[in-house]
Amino acid sequence: MMSEFKDFALKGNVMDMAVGIIIGGAFGKIVASLVNDLLMPLVGLAMGGVSFADLYAALDGNTYESLAVAEEAGAAVFKYGAFIQSSIDFVIIAFVIFMMVKAMNNMRKKQEEAPAAPPEPSEEVTLLTEIRDSLAKS
């Protein structure tokens, strides 16, 4: 059983998957920073200085100064701004991944379209070519 597990764990596919998961996690942080630190402030500015993360509705009927105050008071809050933020994050991440996959497919297609090197001549053809060349010299 241990040898089977060792064979499974050391196969290339498992190692490739592990590398992909690690790189995917790092890539996710980069895209999250892109959305949260660069894009969303611009969107908020375009919408009159509104931050999506701060949009909420208190379900207890009271009015609070901010989301943090409402949560500190223990009020149940409907955080629709966080949902909008997550939805925008998803769309941007999906678009970036789509562009990466499209670029990889284009590179793969170009490799497939590259003409293959002509096959090596057989031994008979090589021998006949040598005989022809030696007769041409004589």
Image: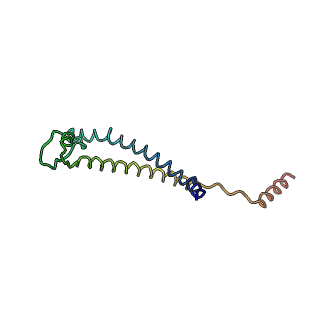
Q: How many marks?
A: 0
**What residue is shown at x 36% (from left), y 40% (from top)?**
33
On screen, residue 105 versus residue 114, left or right, reads: left
Residue 38: x and y, percent? 32, 38
Can you name the residue that lies furthest to the right here?
Answer: 138
Q: Quadrant of the N terminus?
A: bottom right
On screen, residue 104 versus residue 8, left or right, reads: left
- Relative vertical location of residue 115 with respect to residue 85 in this rendering, above or below: below
Can you name the residue that lies furthest to the bottom here?
Answer: 124
**What residue is shown at x 29% (from left), y 41% (from top)?**
40
In this orientation, which residue lies closer to the viewer: 50 or 7? 7
**What residue is shown at x 19% (from left), y 44% (from top)?**
74
Residue 113: x and y, percent? 55, 55
In this orientation, which residue lies closer to the viewer: 42 or 70? 70
On screen, residue 124 versus residue 62, left or right, reads: right
Residue 89: x and y, percent? 33, 47
In this orientation, which residue lies closer to the viewer: 37 or 47? 37
- Relative vertical location of residue 48 with respect to residue 100 in this rendering, above or below: above
- Relative vertical location of residue 38 with respect to residue 18 in this rendering, above or below: above
**What residue is shown at x 46% (from left), y 45% (from top)?**
23
Residue 94: x and y, percent? 37, 51
In this orientation, which residue lies closer to the viewer: 85 or 1? 1
